[in-house]
Image (cartoon, rainbow, N blue to C red):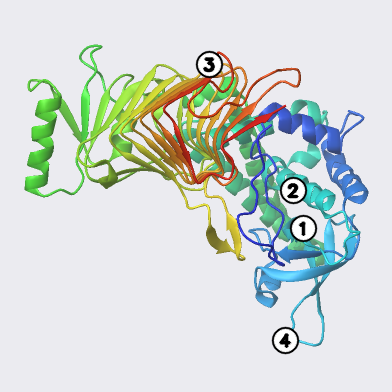
Amino acid sequence: MDHPIKSLQKSNPFETLPETYSCRMSASEIVEDLTKCFNPEKEIVKGQELQQIIVFYAEQTIEPVGWQALWIADSKTNSTLKERLTSPTLVEVSNVDYQSLEATVEVIDEKHEEKETETVLLTELHPLKHQENSAITIEATHNAIQRIRFFYNHLLLPWDSDIQEDWFQFHLPARVGMFCELRSGMLNQETVVRYHYLLSEANEVEKKLQAMALKVEFSEDDMEEEMVGNITELNSKLEQIQQDIEIILNPNTRMLLFGSKVTRVKRNEDPEVLLVVQDQSCLSLHQTLNQLESEFNPQLSIRCYPSLQTALDDCRVDDIVVISKGIHNLYNVNSFRHGGTLIGIGAKEDIVVHPGSNIEVGLTFDDGNVLLKNCTLLINNKQSGIAVKGNVTLENCTLRGACLADNTKNGEKDVGSWKGFYVAPQGKLFLKQCNVINFDVGLRVRAAGQVVLSTSEVSSCNIGILAEEETSVQIYDCELKQCKEYAIGVEMNSDAIGETLLGGKELVPDTFKTENCRFSNNESNVKLEY
């Protein structure tokens, strides 16, 4: 099991419980959890029955009264409510209307003696960690609200009420699978953009249909006839959007529409060099070309691109992409995920690669051999910085997450990114002269994954390295420091017998080795979990 993030500050009376649902869960785990909670008897649930099973779940798990929360407006919040309340607002729940999934709340404002009462959606409430009434089981309420919020924000679609087949069997796995693919960055940019566009269109059409339904209810006959054509047109549009989204949700039909597009024809199978030339002075460009000449064959043909993303859009497997001083934004690695080389020319601190898309994994490398050399990778608000499924090597690189102590959310310290590296089963990661800084978990290594660190540093993380027992982790001449929970954690089977030996000795026989490693200013150096 992955470890939940622990607060890095002293007790805060307005501290909310962490939003962790789905963050460290696979698609199958999410499906299993939602089925267990919403449909434990595994009955056939049609679309029109979804609301009622959510209501039943809320009745069983959410406290009806007497708990405090922060009300935080989202995109679905009523505009008039936004005008009356400033988000976030501290409130106390005085009643929960389970049928509407709403709560009547009293605004806690010491400046006003009269208590202001509002009705808000349950999904907009974020329970406080420290409740005035210790008898309140706030964790169960919080977990229930997280699940319901996830269901409505990521899984439910406008036409679900018309679905006649078993929603949990035929639609839940596909919806969750799509969510996880978007989170991991597995999809190409064209698919991601098209999917989000269709979702936006579907929601807009649904709002228009709801508004027209209200007008028809209170309109005269001639006005009602005038709207029939518009309603029919909107329903037809919604049906077309539904068909398009179903195509994207199905991996097989999706590939027919959004397969890889070839924009450049290579003369042969030899790797080519793609040079990214941003705004540079003549002297700077001359220095870059001189370094290229010393790095590669002077006769080698070089293609120039105005940005890293345009180069990645055009690259082929095993091509070499060269970048120089500057901030290089990217949204999709395309063919580079299957093998290639990215080299920075200049000081690595001045060469910043920033995955800036809204996906939850910065870079995903599926197979082949990938080399990243001499650059800084800046990871903000991602579930993982780099997901390793093939063979990935980093030389003289820095992987930096957002500062763990980010006082931007209600005085609460958030984590900018969950994991620096995520090494999947069978994945292989090699770090040489690298730095991993500011993550919840610096390196997360799953069973059968392999990691080799040499002359590298892992610092300012909650957990430096977290590995399963069946992994192969080798650490040579490295330093692990300022880890706020522990530097190295090994998840072992309950019947396993291991010894915790420090000072450069073997940690777990045959799987976890350290030589000449230094531990400093860590809360704990090593932890074995059974």
Residue corresponding to mark 2:
146
How many numbered dots are placed on residues in this image?
4
Mark 1 or mark 2: name the one nearer the start of the chain: 2
Q: Nearer the viewer, residue 477 or 224?
A: 477
Check disc 1 and report its element: helix, strand or loop. helix
Mark 3 or mark 1: name the one nearer the start of the chain: 1
Task: State the mark number for residue 426.
Answer: 3
Q: Which of 158 and 499 is in front in this view?
A: 499
The amino acid at mark 3 is Gln
Check disc 2 and report its element: helix, strand or loop. helix
Q: Which of marks 3 and 1 is in front?
A: 3
- Image quadrant of residue 83? bottom right
Q: Which of 163 and 139 is in front in this view?
A: 139
Give how far across and how far down residue 361 sits, in percent. Answer: 51, 37
Name the residue: 82% across, 81% down.
Answer: 115
The amino acid at mark 4 is Lys
Q: Which of marks 4 and 2 is in front?
A: 4
Residue corresponding to mark 4:
111
Mark 1–mark 2 CB contact (< 8 Å): no
Mark 4–mark 2 CB contact (< 8 Å): no
The amino acid at mark 2 is Gln
The answer, for residue 331, to whether it is visible in the render is yes
Q: Which of 254 and 95 is in front in this view?
A: 95
- Structural distance between the alpha carbons of marks 1 and 2: 31 Å
The answer, for residue 158, to whether it is visible in the render is no
Mark 3–mark 1 CB contact (< 8 Å): no
- Image quadrant of residue 315? top left
